[in-house]
Image (cartoon, rainbow, N blue to C red):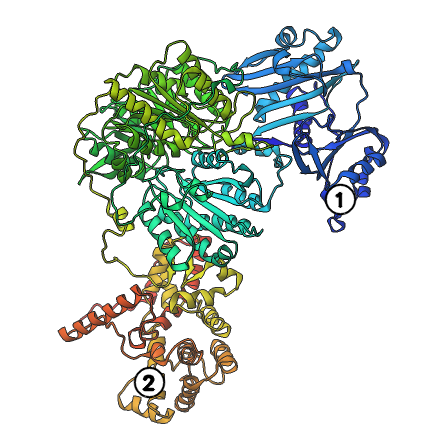
Amino acid sequence: MSAKACREHYGKKLLAKYLGEASNGEVQVEDRAVLITAAILDPSSGVTWDSIAAENPWLLGTRLVAKPDQLIKRRGKAGLLAINKTFEECKAWVMERMMKEQTVEVVTGVLDTFLIEPFVPHEQQDEYYICIQSTRVGEEMLFYHEGGVDVGDVDSKAERLQVPLLKEVTAATVTSQLITRVPLERQEKLASFLVTFLRVYRQLNFVYAEINPIVVDQTGRVTPLDLAAKIDETAAFLCQSQWGEVDFPAPFGRAEFKEEAFIRDMDAKTGASLKLTILNHKGRVWTMVAGGGASVVYADTISDLGFSHELANYGEYSGAPSEEQTFKYAETILSLMTRNMDDRGKVLIVGGGIANFTDVAATFKGLILAIRSFADEIRNNNIKIYVRRAGPNYQEGLRMMKQLAVELGLPIKVWGPETDAVACVPLALGLAEEESLPEYDPDSAAIKTVQKDTAEEPALNATTSAQVTFRAAGEGSGNLVQFDSSTRCIVYGLQQRAVQGMLDFDFMCKREKPSVAAMVFPFSGNHYVKFYWGTSETLIPVYTTIKEALQKSPDVTVMVNFASFRSVYDTMTDALEFAGQLKTIGIIAEGVPESQTRAINLLAEEKGVGIIGPATVGGIKPGCFRIGNTGGMLDNIVSSKLYRPGSVAYVSKSGGMSNELNNIICHNSDGVCEGVAIGGDRYPGSRFIDHLLRYQSNPDVKVLVLLGEVGGIDEYDVCDAMADGRLTKPLVAWCIGTCAGCFSYEVQFGHAGACARGKGETAADKNAALAAAGAHVPPSFASFGTTIHTVYSGLVESGAITPAIEPEVPKVPMDYTWAKRLGLVRKPAAFISTISDDRGEELKYAGMPISEVFSEDIGVGGVLSLLWFRRKLPAYATKFIEMVLMVTADHGPAVSGAHNTIVAARAGKDLVSSLVSGLLTIGPRFGGALDDAARMMSGAVDKGMDPLTFTKEMRKENKLIMGIGHRIKSLDNPDMRVVIIKDFAQKHFPSNACLDFALGVEQITTSKRANLILNVDGCIAVCFVDLMRTCGAFTREEADEVRPCLEPSLRCRAGLLRCRAELLRILWAVARDSPLSTPTRTQLIENGCLNGLFVLGRSIGFIGHYLDQKRLKQPLYRHPWDDISYITGEM
């Protein structure tokens, strides 16, 4: 959504601040004003009339004006102005109306926001009318020498001044063409104000600003009294710092819901498009529609069938939202639906056109999750769900929905592309029998063509048309490329999926060369990317600049621009430098500011380059060329017969609905000859007339189709062309958005341009004008296909069209990735991971979302337990792990690992290399004794041996007791690390069997030599065994199975076979998501987790030594000669 109305208070604050800056202080306007909200009624808010007066002391000594600030038109006539009042009088006036219902003409709403500002004494003759509104080619300034509530129809009597885009207006021009009827003594000040007003208007990306009245007193002081303004919301990345805290309230009469703000916030944080407007929260008909154009079509159909008063919401979810985003969107809808019970029941229509690239099944997973969570509420509220969806992977999505209906016993009806987009709506509203429209059959692979009744439906009544006085400037551009089978392009952006789709289409159409010559990606060096050309592979070069890509590809005439909305302007100005080669550029991005779009269009027209977009999916010429994702996946290309040309050419605003048009045209004629989606923005680079004139000159095109929408005036150019004979071929036309007339307040639909900003911009007006001009205009979109069929059949009967023999359907190999997603193929995974999952919305450790890791504050020990042991250990256990890491972090620079790290660091090696140098010293003689100590001590305990017997056995076998002995420490000079670990274990562990045994061994060994104590390795090892055995999280076998189940050094064939059998058992258990049996789990001690603790802890110290050496800038280390014994003689 682009143009958003702001509060009067906010708009005036912007003008007061920036008019002065833009005029070097010459233009100054009143900036004193206070906004009073419903917080004044809340004692806990801290907002009181006294606090307001204290912050704004001018209120107490100034005559004031009070009025609601809620986008209410004609407040004066509605008695909603308190003029020339004291502060106390304003206070009483506001409190009398705060949070009260008020009817203004036909709109009823609650007053909750008021504006108080200084009263400006003046005479009636001091009031004037000013308006600036943006147009395709610049800004139009309107001025009338009278203002106020009785100004009348200013459109018909105001003076007008067209200011070309990027051109300044002078005070002299304003004086001579706008304000000639203003007294001479006021003209200079007023002209200066108007010049500066336009400058600020453009600077802040306003799209509309009306001041009525504006007062110019005898001294020449200019004061805007009432302001109505709209700002281009998409320009936030350009102007947010200037705008400050922006406030775009809901229209008066439509309450703002917190759910709308939630969806708006979610939309701002994703590349997908998520919109929600609550029209009637008690309504019985709710929609969840994919696509900006489709969402309007569904709202139209519901309204056309007489249910606008029951339509609860308007919104869309599109642009490939994730499963989590779709779940939250659906959850919000269902929460609102089930909030108010209605004995008649409710319906939820889950609809959409045929998606171009959104994975339907992926989004349906989120929807299904939401339906599951609201299953009881759906039953209790007697909600029926009607689903019509198509696009990539729609078969799996619809299958899941049908399965859900059976599983939960919910009334869910499902249809796919075999039906028209809105065919299910009459059923949902109870106007048709459900049996009249067969449901989607997942066992049927073919899409059934719906037979149409060829009877002509009543034409739209042309006499209902409003006065058609609105025309867009300029004639149709001839700059657009006529696509053919040799057309080639470059693609800006690393859009590999879109490029592969274009190449698959090329191969299907039997092109000799791929349509994509190169890609441009500024953020990496020149390289190649591999794509499929049928079953073989091909390489497409990627360049860092448009210039190089075009130099290396001289046959390219088209660029497909996938740059983001933030960088579209820069990439387009760069691309248009090569207008001698590029003739058409498609701009895919949605959300390009109107100011930048208009500047691009102007530059492109000057350079002779045709533009498709912005906010478009592109276009397609069957058998020749397609832009990006137009036409969707290959199955839709086949079902809509886009691999060969037909006789019908269309132009559409909506990209999503363009794919629906492909389907409708295919079902009702011999198919599409060419189709273009010009984009949903208010000022698309190319317009309906540009493409229709191309189609008019193409002898292969016999029928023209136009799908427009509410907002803008480009459709009137088509009316003119039909009237003057430039368009003679039969035209089937419809403008969506007819439901807008059913609402008493303004509704901004999904596309940025889908909002009527003036007379003649409504869908009803434009449909009537098209019908009057001679177009075939159906009574509703539901009859659009029937009208096409009627026109086409008439041309066939007259001999103007001779249907061609249908060629063999081409076959293109399916990508393995997509085939796997459809469930058509399978292969064993290269890796198995059971400890973490980075798919979805949130990283998970052993099934625990990362947000819970922090909210539960499990610490590093808890994270280690999840990733190493796949379970959450008790708090004392994770604390013990952290203590082990702390005590093993370092043992000075002299030990072998630290020494190696230091030497490597001083040799100039990087951190990783130096760390690895130190880690490679860890083994049986340094730090690696933990596993052996654990195995020896626990083994003796398990055999029932006492410490003395164990010591004798080890002596008899001439084995060292691992974990016993220290170079300098003794019982009298204990190692504090051992003391800390031992004391913690004895205090917190349920049992200390292994520790007690080790301490018994220590008593025997120290009697022989004082330094044969239980060292830190041994203490950690035996304590860890006790912990694993007694914390309750592991079985005994899991904790310390002596022989690992998957011995890496199997030497015999029988052992290898057993190992393979165990591996298969693990794989099968993981595939079933079932727990592994005890003997087949990875055994903790034997697999090195104790040594892992030492490695992890000591890495901290090694890194510290590396950083220390770098900080000290130590030179290359060379070992001193006097510390080496050179023995060169014979040994």
- Spot occupied by residue 949 in the image (x, y as percentages of width and height): 34, 93
Residue drawn 53% across the image and 61% down it: 855
- Relative height, residue 537 to residue 651 (above, below): below
Residue drawn 33% across the image and 83% down it: 936
On residue 748, which mark appears?
A: none
Give the spatial CA distance, label 2 vs label 1.
75 Å
Task: Identify the residue under disc 2.
Answer: 939
Q: Nearer the viewer, mark 2 or mark 1?
A: 1
The amino acid on which the numbered mark 2 sits, given as a three-letter code, is Gly
Q: Pick whichever of labels 2 and 1 is earlier in the sequence.
A: 1
State which quadrant residue 356 falls in. top left
Element marked by disc 2: helix
Residue drawn 34% across the image and 71% down it: 1075
| Left or right of residue 610, residue 635 in this image | left
Residue drawn 51% across the image and 15% down it: 468
On the question of residue 860 being in view, the answer is: yes
- Relative height, residue 205 to residue 504 (above, below): above
642 and 245: which one is in front?
642
Give the quadrant of the C terminus: bottom left
On the question of residue 927 being in view, the answer is: no
- Spot occupied by residue 507 in the image (x, y as percentages of width and height): 20, 34
- Spot occupied by residue 829 in the image (x, y as percentages of width and height): 26, 57
Task: Identify the residue under disc 1.
Answer: 40
